[in-house]
Image: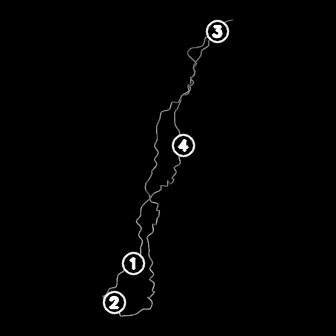
Amino acid sequence: MNDQVPMRDHSTAEEITLHEQRLRFSTRVVPFERVRIERFIVTEQRTFTVDIRREELRIVRQQISEADLGLAAPTILQEPPRDDIIMILSEEQAVITKKIVPVERVRLHTHILTELQEVAEGLGRERIDVTYATDM
């Protein structure tokens, strides 16, 4: 009997393919922040000076001269006539009205900021470990 291990033919070699992990990088857009724009009213107290006019009654008296008496017919009155004169006087009043008018146009733009970010990940790689069996 032959106790020798048969030798393999080296012309037919065995082979194995080794693999390793590789990273692929990509980005995706995800919601980051919600922004709300609010308009609000700020009330300021303003004081203005306005010229206001009103009518006043002024009485102008004139003495009757002797010449004026000679022109009029001589009458003797027991009582002076009581014809009241009624006048309506007027005045200006300040009238305040408010009107909303456009004063400013605000535009919103978004722009993209680019920043660098480090990403670390462990990668696996296959190795070959050859073990010789001496007990054959």
Dot 3 or dot 1, earlier in sequence: 1
Front position among marks 1 and 4: 1
Mark drawn on residue 127 = none
Q: What residue is disc 3 on? A: 134
In the picture shown, does residue 99 fall above or below 105? below
Mark 4: secondary structure: loop
Is 29 drawn above or below residue 75 in the view shown?
A: above
Q: Do the residues under discs 4 and 2 have CB atoms within 8 angstroms? A: no
Distance of label 1 from label 4 (alpha carbons): 79 Å
Give the foreground label among 2 and 1: 2
Disc 2: which residue:
69
Please give the name of the residue rendered at 64% of the width and 9% of the height, measured from the top-left corner.
134
Tell me the CA gap for discs 4 and 2: 99 Å
Q: Which residue is mark 4?
A: 33
Q: CA distance from mark 2 to mark 1?
A: 22 Å
Q: Amino acid at mark 4?
A: Glu
Would residue 117 be seen by someone viewing this image from the given angle? yes
Q: Amino acid at mark 1?
A: Ile
